[in-house]
Image (cartoon, coloured by chain):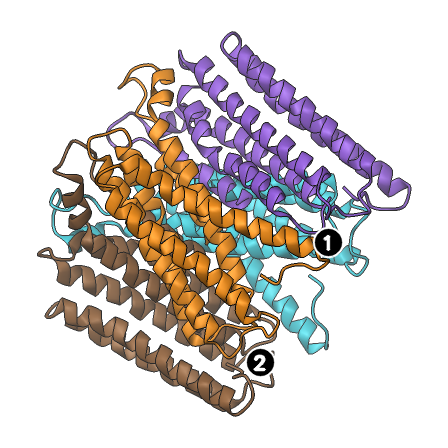
Chain colours: A purple, B orange, C brown, D cyan
Amino acid sequence: MFAIACTLLILEIRLPHPGVDGHLWTNFVALWPSYLAFVLSFFVILVSWIAHHDAMQLIRAPTQWVMLANGCALLYVTFIPFPTAALAANLGGPEVGTAVAFYSGTFVFGSGAYNLLLETIARCELRDPRAGAEAVERIRRGYRLAFTTYLVATGLAFVAPYVALALTIAVRVHLLRIRGLRERIARTSGHWPSV
Amino acid sequence: MFAIACTLLILEIRLPHPGVDGHLWTNFVALWPSYLAFVLSFFVILVSWIAHHDAMQLIRAPTQWVMLANGCALLYVTFIPFPTAALAANLGGPEVGTAVAFYSGTFVFGSGAYNLLLETIARCELRDPRAGAEAVERIRRGYRLAFTTYLVATGLAFVAPYVALALTIAVRVHLLRIRGLRERIARTSGHWPSV
Amino acid sequence: MFAIACTLLILEIRLPHPGVDGHLWTNFVALWPSYLAFVLSFFVILVSWIAHHDAMQLIRAPTQWVMLANGCALLYVTFIPFPTAALAANLGGPEVGTAVAFYSGTFVFGSGAYNLLLETIARCELRDPRAGAEAVERIRRGYRLAFTTYLVATGLAFVAPYVALALTIAVRVHLLRIRGLRERIARTSGHWPSV
Amino acid sequence: MFAIACTLLILEIRLPHPGVDGHLWTNFVALWPSYLAFVLSFFVILVSWIAHHDAMQLIRAPTQWVMLANGCALLYVTFIPFPTAALAANLGGPEVGTAVAFYSGTFVFGSGAYNLLLETIARCELRDPRAGAEAVERIRRGYRLAFTTYLVATGLAFVAPYVALALTIAVRVHLLRIRGLRERIARTSGHWPSV
């Protein structure tokens, strides 16, 4: 689903009909909001994929509740192409604030779903015994930081849309960086990180 | 296919062209029928996925007949984005009854395909020996309940479309709940449910 | 790819814009050519999937040439949604002959690709030793029959389009039936068919 | 993702609305730029797929940096349907030079991403020990040749667009051929090539 959602993003980028408007090169350049929204959402889905993969490794088999929470998380991922198209259509326009708020609001919902997923996993009796309590706690801290940031960004979007947009990306870069750090430590100490 | 059908649902949600109509926020709000239809059909496909997974675990390998019945079930899943788009375009409109009847009628066909799949599996000489007759009977009861409910909902749609729509969702929630109950019992008694 | 091509077929079925034309029920009924083309092409892709699966089981690993022939076969499968849309737009119309000829001509190309795939597999030094020469010969006879039938159907399409369309489906039903017969014989004699 | 990107290409080929323009056969013929662009990009994605597969076999597990470089490579593959549609809309038209430059420029970016991926793999401590330095060097030479060719083709596109287009395809055919040669040598000497 992550792969499909990523790939569907490109369908939202369309050239105007030939002959109707200006030169081809002008049209390519005028589509910069679409390229930017495409790259941002591609990155968003990749990071969500890694986070989902990390969370799912904490359990041996999903229970009914984990499957339902997982369904909410996947619903969010599947939804992303729509706010992406809305963002692309309004970047640089007069209503960019509303578009960024909607985009960022989607992440509030998505982050809520991921937090729910983690809590059902933490309470799941099929949790992988090798995944200690502090591994869960570490992921939980990251998820809560993301949720708070998206909430702030959604409010900020109406005032300073581009700052809000940068904030939603920055928190993901930060989460990837601390994940990479953990991985480097684990490898130096001679074993792979369990999460 | 289930994953692809889920993800394609989002392509049916489209913003009106910028500049043509009102404010962006009004447009986001006006799309509520699309969001609702998206969430409903996403849930429908997820439940169909779980049901398909459960049924397929009853056999060791598919025979030609199981594959054909399976083809009908997958045809139904692949078809879902179309009645979903029709539902989204008519929720809150004067022809919502017809749209719900078509949506619900799709489930009558789909449920028929699932019943056919189960019967070919029950008669298949490659049935997993660990899947006892009562496991098949339990699934069969659920499938028949779903088929009857969808048939009733399709007729009801012309009179009370929203009640009919709620009914098609309610039967799926019910089936998920009894499946979850079975799972809980199986785990308490110390072994995973075979189905 | 087979799964994706199947699922993309549904995107070609679209309701006219609400308000613009007649009643919803009339619109649903008027789309019968789209439903028919959808079901036919879904069946076509499923049968191609089974045939591809059977052919690929003849080898242990693909060589460069098998991969190229396989690329042609996949190109054909990926192309199917386009002639399907053309067929749906012209069933019952004055130019149905041209549409069926194009649809059937796609199968001539596809069948050519499958024949090429089988010949590269038959000459491949990585052929599975359990796949005897007569297994290859049996599949080859089926592929040649299909190729000839599609060629005839393409010519016939301009004269009797619906007969030509029925012919392209009939040959696939026939191939599935003899495949099922083989499977039944193999199971009675106590071992699974290698192909 | 490669499979999905391939299959999405077909969605860019659309017939004009029936009744609006000329005869169906004329419409089929007039779409030749779309068919050509479809086949070219299908081939491009298949070759990228093989190259990606070869590169990924050099490591046992991806590190964070390999995953990021891999993300760039996948971003490129996912983007391909858009320049393909632009190419199809302008083949044979007055702005074909711009369209080929954009198409070829996409390959410059993509090839850059693949070169980055290979360098992170070459420096990755999880490199498969069976993948010797000369295997990496061989792939690196191919990637650099491709990068240079795409750069030349992008500049050439404004002067001789069809030559530039042929050049981007020719380099891929060349890379496939030397890969096939390597495979044949490896098989004659009695073992499979590690890459």
Estimate how packed mark 2 is, as few (under 14), some (14 to 19) or many (20 or more) residues with alpha carbons within 10 Å: some
Q: Please, which chain is the residue tagged with disc 1 on? A: D
Q: Residue at x 27, y 18 (%)?
A: B21
- How far across and how far down the image is residue D167, in percent? 47, 50
Secondary element under disc 2, as helix, strand or loop, is: loop
Q: Quadrant of residue A54?
A: top right
**Front: mark 1 or 2:** 2
Residue that label 1 marks: D136
Q: Residue at x 80, y 33 (%)?
A: A181
Residue that label 2 marks: C127
Q: Are marks 1 and 2 on the same chain?
A: no
Outermost residue on the right side: it is: A189
Instruction: State the separation of the CA atoms marked 1 and 2.
Output: 30 Å
Q: Nearer the viewer, residue A160 or C143?
A: A160
- How far across and how far down the image is residue C159, in percent? 10, 70
Q: Quadrant of residue A170?
A: top right
Residue B20 located left or right of residue A64: left
Q: Residue at x 65, y 53 (%)?
A: B185
